Image (cartoon, rainbow, N blue to C red):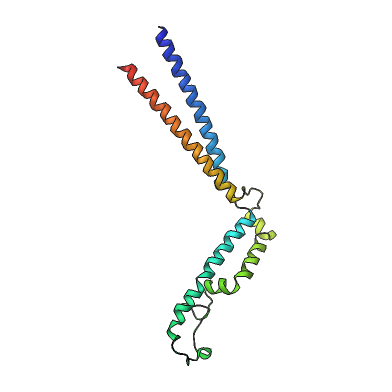
């Protein structure tokens, strides 16, 4: 009878330990979720959009060179009176390509983007920045830490469950 009581007590202890670890796991996951979904700060949002402007602009010189390469060895070609649209290589003659716009006006666009995210109209429609998360570098570091803790705890829980199942199977024999 003593053996059965000891086994019962051990299984109750393992069950309590599993519940405690499961609760800690849930807490870790709940602390991770807001880090993943919290909005960017206005500065980080502007940085991201300015990065798009920069990336688009960097494509323009190559596109322009590809389009104009055919006239490289035609120095007498009358470019001033040609129908070449250097503002939209390969595109509509009446429009300016995003690449050209970002290359030629990129600095102004980036400054205006930084102003736009602080504009009251933008802030109102965006929903404000009161719920912005911590800066991305800090956020990414903390998410990585939480992911390691979560993974270790999930493995630990799995190992405990496996050990308990092995013990139950041994008792049934």
> Which percent across, then down, holds residue 169?
33, 21
Task: Tell me the quadrant of the picture where the C terminus can be found.
Answer: top left
- Which quadrant: the N terminus? top left
Q: Residue at x 45, y 86 (%)?
A: 71
Q: Quadrant of residue 167?
A: top left
Residue 161 % position (x, y): 41, 27
* Residue located 66% across and 56% down the image: 123
Based on the displayed image, in which of its 4 quarters is residue 4 positioned? top left
Q: Going 39% across and 25% down the picture, which residue do you hit?
A: 163
Where residue 99 sits in the image (x, y, percent)?
52, 72
**Left or right: 162, with 95 as reference point:** left
Residue sitting at the far left = 173
The residue at the far bottom in this view is: 76
In percent of width and height, residue 112 lies at: 65, 66
Q: Nearer the viewer, residue 71 or 11?
A: 71
How many numbered discs? Answer: 0
Compared to residue 70, the image places residue 24 above or below, namely: above
Relative depth, front residue between 130 and 77? 77
Out of 63 and 133, give the one closest to the viewer. Answer: 63
Task: Write the residue at 49% across / 84% down.
Answer: 84
Q: Residue furthest right?
A: 120
Q: Is residue 102 left or right of residue 165?
A: right
When the figure is inspected, residue 60 is found, relative to residue 30, above or below; the finding is below
């Amino acid at each position: 009878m003593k053996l059965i009581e000891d086994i019962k007590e051990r299984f109750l202890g393992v069950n309590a330990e599993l519940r405690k670890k499961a609760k800690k796991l849930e807490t870790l996951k709940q602390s991770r979720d807001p880090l993943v979904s919290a909005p960017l700060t206005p500065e980080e949002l502007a940085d991201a959009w300015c990065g798009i402007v920069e990336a688009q602009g960097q494509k323009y010189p190559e596109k322009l060179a590809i389009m104009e390469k055919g006239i490289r060895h035609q120095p007498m070609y009358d470019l001033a009176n040609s129908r070449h649209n250097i503002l939209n290589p390969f595109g509509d003659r009446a429009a300016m390509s995003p690449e050209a716009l970002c290359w030629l006006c990129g600095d102004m666009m980036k400054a205006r983007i930084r102003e736009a995210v602080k504009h009251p109209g933008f802030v109102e429609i965006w929903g404000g920045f009161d719920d912005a998360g911590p800066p991305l570098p800090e956020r990414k570091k903390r998410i990585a830490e939480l992911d390691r803790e979560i993974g270790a705890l999930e493995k630990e829980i799995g190992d405990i469950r496996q050990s308990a199942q092995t013990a139950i199977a041994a008792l049934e024999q």
